[in-house]
Image (cartoon, grey):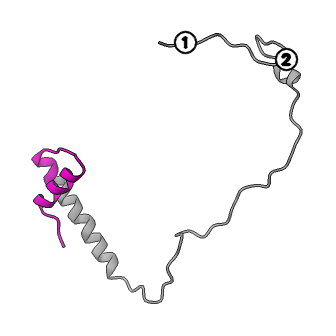
Amino acid sequence: MSVTLKDAEHIAELARLKFSKKELESFTHQLNQILEYVEKLNELDTENIEPLSHPVEGNNIFREDILKPSISRGEALKNAPDSDEEFFKVPKVIIS
């Protein structure tokens, strides 16, 4: 199966894209190269190959959640240039 210029125009129309004639010719060539590659893959003997749900075997690599004490609010605010008792104070920023 190969893609014709008319097929590429139809695909572009379905995707609501507009291309020049030169671009469509280029895309037609590229799509045909992709299809040739897929045909090469179809030549492989996959008779004894089990399908995979994922191409790479992997395990969950997340670490366990461990509850650790955090720094106190006062410690966090002590180096702030401006703060009140509980919060960092920052300049008001309004962009209109």
- For the residue labelled by badge 2, is the local secondary structure a helix, a strand or a loop? loop
Q: Which residues are magenta?
A: 1-25
Relative side of 78 to 40, left or right: right
Name the residue rendered at 21%, 45% in the picture.
17
- Residue 16 within the segment the image draws in magenta: yes
Residue at 65% over, 10% down: 91
Q: Quadrant of the N terminus?
A: bottom left
Q: What residue is pinned by disc 2? A: 78
Q: Which secondary structure type mostly characterizes the magenta part of the structure?
A: helix
Expressed as whole percent of the image width and height from the top left, the position of residue 93 reads 58, 12
Q: Which mark is residue 42?
A: none
Query: Marks 2 and 1, how far apart in space?
Result: 27 Å
Q: Which mark is residue 94?
A: 1
Residue most toward the bottom?
48
Q: Quadrant of residue 30?
A: bottom left
- Binning the other alpha carbons within 10 Å of mark 2 as few (below 14), some (14 to 19) or many (20 upward) gives few
Contact, CB < 8 Å: mark 2 with mark 1? Answer: no
40 falls in the magenta region: no
